[in-house]
Image (cartoon, grey):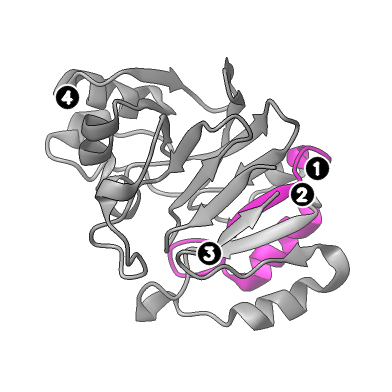
Amino acid sequence: MAKLTFHGHATFSIETDDGTHLVIDPYFEDNPGFTGSLDDIEADFVLITHGHFDHVTDVEPLVRRTGATIIASFEIASYFEAKHGFTCSPQHIGGGVQYPFGHVKLTPALHGGKLDLEGGGDYTTVPAGLLIKLASGQRFHHAGDTALLTDMQLLNGQVDVAVLPIGDRFTMGPDDAVRAVDFIEPSVVIPCHYDTWPPIEQDAEAFRDAVGDRARVEIMKPGDSYDF
């Protein structure tokens, strides 16, 4: 079993069956939902969906402490290589790479591409989702910050656990997230990117009700873990 932990907003970590630690979109210190310490976060790989502050703020201190490899779009990877000398594995939309822990493919997402880091203006990129097929067989999708895309239909039959934003305003809202569930048909759906701040407050229980029998909805609070 792999262990998925929610750290608030859109930040998750996965501990694989073999003990590899993956961190997705590190946003800890200024994350209103995070109550732990960044110093306690373990990382062998850091995966980045896009460059907005609430997804990359803590990449630098986390990677500097752990020596983790960054998996991100070519532009974001180039930034961390050029500015910090970090080890990076660049990818881009539609491209996949086999890692010791499993296969990672970047999937389309419709959102902004600004890199909110010092000197990041030359590294604007497109956002992405993450399709992770662990070596132990589990299939996990983090949609990143995105609107509803018909391209999500291409994920049908490839995802066991899907993390979808439901906050509206900056991403798809609950209604479109339900349609995304129809497109992807995962077994389990975990909502994220909501309730962090008042502009993206949502009723996760109402989302669960709207999903109905399409999938099991796991509502995770910051600090919660889910084995899959």
Q: Is 119 displayed left or right of 91 in the figure? A: left
Viewer-nearest of labels 2 and 4?
A: 4
Viewer-nearest of labels 4 and 3?
A: 3
- Whichever of callouts 1 and 2 sits on the residue coming sooner in the sequence is 1
Residue 212 vertical position relative to residue 22 in the rendered view, above or below? below
Q: Is residue 163 magenta?
A: yes
Q: Is 152 displayed left or right of 202 in the figure? A: right
In the picture of the structure, the residue carrying the numbered disc 4 is 84
Residue 224 - label: 3
In the picture of the structure, the residue carrying the numbered disc 2 is 184
Q: CA distance from mark 1 to mark 4?
A: 38 Å
Q: Secondary structure at mark 3?
A: loop
Q: Are marks 1 and 2 in contact (CB under 8 Å)?
A: yes
- Range of magenta residues: 154-183
Q: Secondary structure at mark 2?
A: helix
Q: Residue at x 17, y 24 (%)?
A: 84
